[in-house]
Image (tube, rainbow, N blue to C red):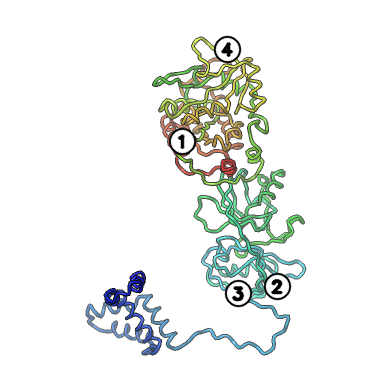
Amino acid sequence: MLQWCLMAVKCRNPICWVFILQHVSLSNSSFVYECLQTFLRDSPAPALDYASGLSLQLLIDIRSLPGCSEEAKELYRLLRQPHLQALLSAHDTVAQKDYEPVLPPMPDELPEEEEATRIVCLVKNKQPLGATIKRNENTGQIFVARVIHGGLADRSGLLHAGDRIIEVNGFPVDGMEPEQVIQVVQVRAQGTIVFKVVPITERPVHNQTMLYVRAMVDYSPEQDSAIPCADAGMSFKKGDMLEVVDQTDALWWQAKKLPGSSACAGLIPSTNLLKRKQREFWWSQPYQPNACIHTLSPVEEEEDMMAIDDKCVEAEEDDFSSSAEGLFLVGFRRSMRLCRRRSHSTASSSCHPRCPNSCCSALSSPYEEVVRYQRHPQDAHRLIALLGPSGVGVNELRRRLIEINPNIFQGAVPHTTRAPRGYEESGREYHFISRAVFDNMIQNNRFLEYGEYKGSLYGTSVDSVREVLNSGRICVMDIEPNAIPAVRTHELKAYVIYVKPPKDERLKETRRGAHITTNYYVNRPFKDEDFQEIEESARKIESQFCQFFDHVIVNDELQDSCVQMLTAVRKAQDEPQWVPANWIRATST
């Protein structure tokens, strides 16, 4: 419409003006404008100021009629609607100008030392208020220590950390112990709770960014004697994804678990505090009742108190290579697996030679910062790293995955110092190299893992993995747990799949008739001690490395496990995943 007016002004054509003036939109706009002017000139007044009372009388009269018509019944239903009743009540309030409450007049003289107070009313409906309090031991005054993100107090925006509480439900709280204040609040499990507070004069402005982390340790607030309030704390396990929503406190962060339905955050130790406490193994100590009322150690420098309202596999196979569709598939190599079992590897040290500093820090840091990452179709595929206790079927799953489609899945060709056998070809079964070359590769940190078996060295190099990835295929390899830091890099972006044994009875049932390969090239049936070793090894792997698992498969039935693994591999390549933040930073730089 505006464009037409501008065009008419430019062309100055009377015909254009006639067309515009006759347009329906302009006509309607003109009518609305005239109505508004009439309203401003002659403001409407209510015809009566007792509409709600009249509707009530009408309801009584209709109900008393012996035989009501359908129209009367419909009018009765309409007048009883709560929305209509509320509208009539609001009409009467405006008509009578009954704007309660009427504030008393300000006194003529006010003491200069009088503090400005605020009345805060919160409606509690069986949910925690989401705030903690502390007591100044010198003055006996009660303060709001912190407001929990997402809690009732936070959502209201009426209580802030630093506010001094004077009264709760009409009871003065100065000089009271925090437990006594809580008892006053807990008198009402739900309903309106009234706080009289002296607001903090200057609230700090926090420009915080969201932080997402993966928990690398277990934590239980009930077992932490240093937490300001155990009821406000949040427990987590290794591998849990956490959204840190508040880092204002240098010692105690506020976080939520992902995925999670709770809108209210919980207290967790900050990175610095958890690192300091990590050496004491305090999260695994026996439970010590925490009254949340004792002054913290001097390093904490605060006296936080309680929350305001709540106490607060198949048989191992021989050394082989198989061919499918003209492509040689590198299968399980007994010598490679056995050298891992019997000898050391680079991964067994505390710091892997190929592990960058940022990767090693993930092993020592209580939290690993993560971001959502989705592989671009033009990028190299992510490495698929399988691990599990010996005998659980890791290699068989790997072999079957490659056999499904060797044009997509391929294994990395290992290096060895032993002499090739008659049917072997360098670069197909192994890369056959001299011991001097192998030692030089070790010195230059070119192996993801390596070991020695019967005088010969075996290892998987990062170059072999990179060759598969650069060819456009998905590299699938089985690793020992200690090699996890070497493959979790920004270049390989390993997706770690842990193959877990089923329960004891099912483990024995699925391995009945199968054979296991010993260190001396002897295939023999599984024994009870083999099953015990598998279970014990699985417990150790999960206890030490579960925080690095991207996916877990219980190898109950081999065919089902293979389908699960294929699904997981496709998700790893095509769907967003949580990955260490340093992978993305290293890629962008």
Which of pointers 4 and 1 indicates the residue nearer the eye? Answer: 4
Q: Are marks 3 and 1 in contact (CB under 8 Å)?
A: no
Q: Amino acid at mark 4?
A: Ala
Asked if the residues shown at circle 1 and circle 2 are in contact, with their CB atoms under 8 angstroms apart, the answer is no
Q: CA distance from mark 4 to mark 1?
A: 35 Å
Horizontally, residue 276 falls left or right of residue 148, namely right
Quadrant of the drawing holding the C terminus: top right
**In front here: 513 or 23?**
23
Point out the frontmost of discs 4 and 2: 4
145 over 347 or under it: above or below? below
Q: Amino acid at mark 1?
A: Val
Residue at position x 51%, y 9% in the image: 422
> Mark 4 falls on what kind of element?
loop
Question: In the rendered image, which residue does mark 4 sit on?
Answer: 419
Q: Which residue is mark 1?
A: 569
Residue placed under numbered mark 3 in the picture: 169
